[in-house]
Amino acid sequence: MPASKPAIPLEPLSPLGPPDPSIPQAAEMIGVSERTMRRAIERGEVEAYKLLGNTRVKLASLHMFLQRARSVPLKLLPPASPGKRLRGRPKRSDYAASAE
């Protein structure tokens, strides 16, 4: 009986953990564009470093960035009055009424 192949390829694991992703890989991981990732690095929201000429994003910094992004409350539209449907863009008066 021939030996079956393992379901998971056996690769040596680094004692340091998974390698830090490149900018395109990090952007794909969190679902943003490469340009958005570069802007976050430029603003200091995500830590990155150069390794042999390639920019790598620190995984821990990427996880913290995601947690901060998820904790920012979204601006919601003001509640519509009963029987009134909002169509198109909300007017400034709609926001002023909800602030009171």
Image (cartoon, rainbow, N blue to C red):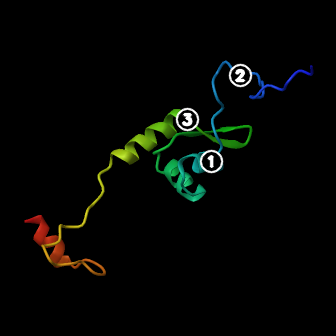
The answer to whether residue 36 is left or right of residue 96 is: right
Q: Residue 23 has which mark?
A: 1
Q: Residue 78, relative to residue 54: is it above or below?
A: below
Q: Quadrant of the C terminus?
A: bottom left
- Give x and y (percent) for residue 22: 65, 43
Q: Answer yes or no: do the residues labelled 3 and 2 have beta carbons within 8 Å?
A: no
Instruction: Report the residue at 30% width, 56% height from top.
Output: 74
In space, the residues marked 1 and 3 are separated at their CA atoms by 11 Å
Distance between the Cα atoms at labels 2 and 1?
Answer: 22 Å
* Residue at image location 38% in from the left, 43% down from the top: 68
How crowded is the residue under tag 3: few (<14 C-alpha within 10 Å), some, or many (20+)?
some
From what the image shows, is residue 78 above or below residue 39? Answer: below
| Element type at mark 3 | helix
Labels 3, 2: front one: 2
> Which one is in front in this view, the residue at disc 2 or the one at disc 1?
2
Q: Name the secondary structure under disc 2.
A: loop
Query: Which residue carries the number 2 mark?
Result: 13
Label 3 sits on what residue type? Leu
Percent coordinates x, y for residue 63 in the rendering: 48, 37
Between 26 and 51, the one lying in front of the other is: 26
Q: Secondary structure at mark 1?
A: helix
Horizontal side of residue 82 vs 85, given as left or right: left
**Which labelled disc corresponds to residue 59?**
3
Which residue shows up at 26% across the image and 62% down it?
Answer: 76
What's the residue at 13%, 67% (across, down)? 98
